[in-house]
Image (cartoon, helix red, strand yellow):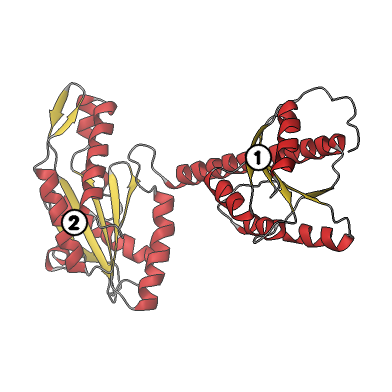
C-alpha cells in the first residue's frame, strides 16, 4: 500500500461525519482507523441497502462508497442518493479497483463526485476527502445565503403589501387584488361585492384619548372585520379609519348582510386601550357587480364609497347599498344616469 506523506495541519476540512460503505469488514476497519486519526467521525455500512437506510435516517457529510458490492452496487446507491430531493448535498467518493474510463464515467453519471482507485494512496484520499468537504461547506453556505435572501425578499413583499398597524392588506395591495378579483368575476360571470366602512367620529378618539388609544381602536376594528370575513375574502385598511372588504362570489344583498353583521358587533363592542375604554359605531357602504352602473374596478370602489357617504349623512351606524331606495333618496344627478351621493368625495369631514 503506498506510503502516506506527512500530515497537513488540521483545519475545519478535517471535521465531519464520513460513512464508509464496503462489503469487506477489513477494508472498513482500515479506512475507519485512518479517517478517525485525521479527526473525522465515521460510521459504516456493509451493504448498499444498509447504506441507504443510514443516509436517510441521518445524512453524513461525505460517503466513501465501494463500487463492487453484491445485491445493490455502489453505482445504484449513488444514483438513489443523488435522486432523493429530500436529502442535502452529500459528496460521494467512489472507491474501486477498476480503473477504466468506462467505469469512472458510469459512476460519475450516477452522481459520484470523485473517484479513488485501490490500492488506496492515503495522502491522495485525505486530499480528496478534504476537497469534497470544502465543496460541501461552500454548498451549505450558498444554500444558507439563498434561504436568507428568500426570507428577506418575503419580508419585503409582506411589508410592501401590509398595513403596519393592523396587519391587514394596505391600500396598494387592495387595489392590486381588486383588479385580479374583478377580472376573475367577469371571466367566470360570478358576482363580486365591495364593502367600504369606517368608524364613526373617530377623530374624537385621537383628540380625547390620544393616538395610542386610536391605534388600539383601529386594531380591534380590523380584528373584528377579519374575524367576520371568509378565508377567500380580502380585508384591508384603505386609509386612516377607512377599511375595505372584497367579497368574491357575493351578491350586493349578501355583502349587505355581512356589513350589518359587522356593524352590530362594532356597536356592541367595548374598545379597550391603556388607561380606558370607549364605544364607537361604524358606517358601511356596499356596492356590487354585475350592475349596469358598475363597469370597472374604479366605479365599483367609487359607488361603495358613495354609499358609505350616504350612511354617514343619514345618521351613521348604518349599512347603505348603492342604488338602493335609501341611497337614491340622497343623491343628485351628474348629468348621466348614474346616481351620485350629495357631497360625494368630500365626506371626510362628516365622518
On screen, residue 296 above or below 76: below
Q: Residue at x 74, y 26 (%)?
A: 37
On screen, residue 232 above or below 348: below
Which residue is label 1 attached to?
A: 61
Depth order, front residue of 323/140: 140
Q: Residue 310's mark?
A: 2
The Cα–Cα distance between marks 2 and 1, rounded to whole angstroms, is: 69 Å
The image shows residue 28 at horizontal and vertical percentages of 71, 41
- Residue 188 occupies quadrant: bottom left
Q: Residue at x 17, y 62 (%)?
A: 256
On screen, residue 250 above or below 93: below
Indicate which disc, 2 or 1, sits on the residue closer to the N terminus: 1
Label 2 Cα crowd, 10 Å radius (few <14 / some 14-19 / many 20+):
many
Report helix, strand or loop for mark 1. Answer: loop
**Mark 2 or 1: the one toward you:** 1
Q: Is residue 213 left or right of residue 115?
A: left
On screen, residue 276 above or below 152: above
Q: Residue at x 19, y 54 (%)?
A: 284
Q: Is residue 147 left or right of residue 247?
A: right
Q: Quadrant of the C terminus?
A: top left
Amino acid at each position: 500500500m503506498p506510503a502516506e506523506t506527512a500530515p497537513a495541519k488540521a483545519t475545519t476540512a478535517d471535521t465531519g461525519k464520513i460513512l464508509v460503505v464496503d462489503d469487506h469488514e477489513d477494508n472498513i476497519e482500515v479506512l475507519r482507523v485512518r479517517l478517525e486519526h485525521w479527526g473525522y467521525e465515521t460510521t459504516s455500512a456493509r451493504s448498499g441497502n444498509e447504506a441507504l437506510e443510514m443516509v436517510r435516517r441521518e445524512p453524513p457529510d461525505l460517503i466513501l462508497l465501494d463500487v463492487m458490492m453484491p445485491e445493490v452496487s455502489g453505482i445504484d446507491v449513488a444514483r438513489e442518493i443523488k435522486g432523493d430531493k429530500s436529502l442535502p448535498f452529500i459528496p460521494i467518493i467512489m472507491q474501486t479497483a477498476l480503473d477504466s474510463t468506462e467505469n469512472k464515467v458510469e459512476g460519475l453519471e450516477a452522481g459520484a463526485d470523485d473517484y479513488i482507485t485501490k490500492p488506496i494512496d492515503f495522502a491522495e484520499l485525505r486530499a480528496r476527502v478534504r476537497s469534497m468537504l470544502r465543496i460541501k461547506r461552500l454548498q451549505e453556505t450558498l444554500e444558507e445565503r439563498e434561504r436568507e435572501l428568500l426570507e428577506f425578499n418575503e419580508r419585503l413583499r409582506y411589508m410592501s403589501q401590509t398595513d403596519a398597524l393592523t396587519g391587514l392588506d394596505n391600500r396598494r395591495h387592495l387595489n392590486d387584488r381588486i383588479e385580479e378579483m374583478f377580472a376573475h368575476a367577469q371571466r367566470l360571470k360570478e358576482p363580486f361585492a365591495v364593502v367600504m366602512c369606517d368608524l364613526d367620529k373617530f377623530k374624537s378618539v385621537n383628540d380625547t384619548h390620544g393616538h395610542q388609544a386610536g391605534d388600539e381602536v383601529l386594531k380591534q376594528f380590523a380584528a373584528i372585520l377579519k374575524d367576520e370575513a371568509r378565508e377567500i375574502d380580502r380585508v384591508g385598511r384603505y386609509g386612516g379609519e377607512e377599511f375595505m372588504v372584497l367579497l368574491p362570489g357575493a351578491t350586493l344583498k349578501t355583502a349587505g348582510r355581512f356589513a350589518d353583521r359587522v356593524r352590530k358587533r362594532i356597536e356592541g363592542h367595548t374598545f379597550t386601550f391603556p388607561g380606558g375604554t370607549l364605544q364607537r359605531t361604524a358606517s358601511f357602504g356596499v356596492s356590487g357587480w354585475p350592475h349596469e352602473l358598475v363597469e370597472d374596478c374604479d366605479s365599483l370602489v367609487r359607488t361603495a364609497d358613495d354609499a358609505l357617504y350616504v350612511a354617514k349623512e343619514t345618521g351613521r351606524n348604518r349599512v347603505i347599498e348603492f342604488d338602493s331606495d335609501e341611497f337614491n333618496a340622497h343623491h343628485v344627478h351628474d348629468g348621466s344616469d348614474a346616481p351620485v351621493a350629495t357631497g360625494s368625495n368630500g365626506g371626510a369631514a362628516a365622518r
